[in-house]
Image (spheres, grey):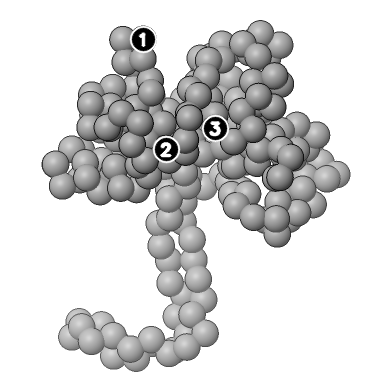
Amino acid sequence: TKTIPKPMLKVNKKPILENIILSFKKKGFSNFLISTNYLAKKIINYFGDGALLDVNINYIKEKKSLGTAGSLSLLNKKKVIDDIFITNGDLYGNLDYSNMLHVHKKRLNDCTVCVRVHSYDLPYGLITERNDVNFLNEKPKLTYLINSGIYIIKKKILKHIKKSTYLNMTDLLNYLKKKNYKIGIYTVYEPIYDIGNLKQYKAVKSIFKNKKY
């Protein structure tokens, strides 16, 4: 990624970011806003206004890295008319985004976090001090809900994001929880590939090398 931004790395012959846009488009979404900073011109020159993909694309241009939530401070709030999907630019998946939005609105959530189930076989005996469970469990399987890097927020959440100030989504969510906003979760069972490093990138490329996604 010294010469190309990570979202532009190719999986299945297309940049990761293009796969994200197309997966949303498949579910009826057409308006996209890409937050750019590192090697921004390579993203803007590739996608332009989105016409070649039959979608509308605009850009946030960060002068410095602001984090996933901090970049939202540069939004023109007057143009925001509905709830907003936020997704990391290094995810590869094909999710039912329309159903996620439906559940978000049906449950009247202020924010919805997309999560997935992760199980881990602990190679040790686990000691538990609670009285209502076994004291010692030998090599148990531990199951967690983990953040997938996809969110939906209501427009009113934007007022809590300081202009041009670095802010991670996790910090914003913890703040909103303390302020008693309604934060819901949406569990996905479809595969989501988080391309966070070179090893993961090579693994994902290998999975889709000989098949159409």
Which badge, 1 or 2, is on the more N-terminal residue?
Answer: 2
Residue wearing tag 1: 79
**Residues packed near mark 3 inside 10 Å, few (<14), some (14 to 19) or many (20 plus):** some
Q: Residue at x 33, y 89 (%)?
A: 127
Residue type at mark 3?
Asn
- Camera-side residue of 46 and 40: 40
Left or right of 33? Residue 73 is: left
**Residues packed near mark 1 inside 10 Å, few (<14), some (14 to 19) or many (20 plus):** few
Q: Is residue 156 above or below residue 198?
A: above
Q: CA distance from mark 2 to mark 3?
A: 9 Å
Residue type at mark 2?
Leu
Residue type at mark 1?
Lys
The reply to whether residue 100 is visible in this rendering is no
Which badge, 3 or 1, is on the more N-terminal residue?
Answer: 3
Residue wearing tag 3: 37
Please identify, in this view, whether the residue under mark 3 or under mark 1 is nearer the observer: 3
Image quadrant occupied by the N terminus = top right
Q: Residue at x 47, y 35 (%)?
A: 64
Residue wearing tag 2: 66
Q: Secondary structure at mark 2?
A: loop
Left or right of 121? Residue 10 is: right
Q: Secondary structure at mark 1?
A: helix
- Camera-side residue of 192 and 65: 65
Marks 2 and 3 close (CB-CB < 8 Å): yes
Which badge, 2 or 3, is on the more N-terminal residue?
Answer: 3
Image quadrant occupied by the C terminus = top right
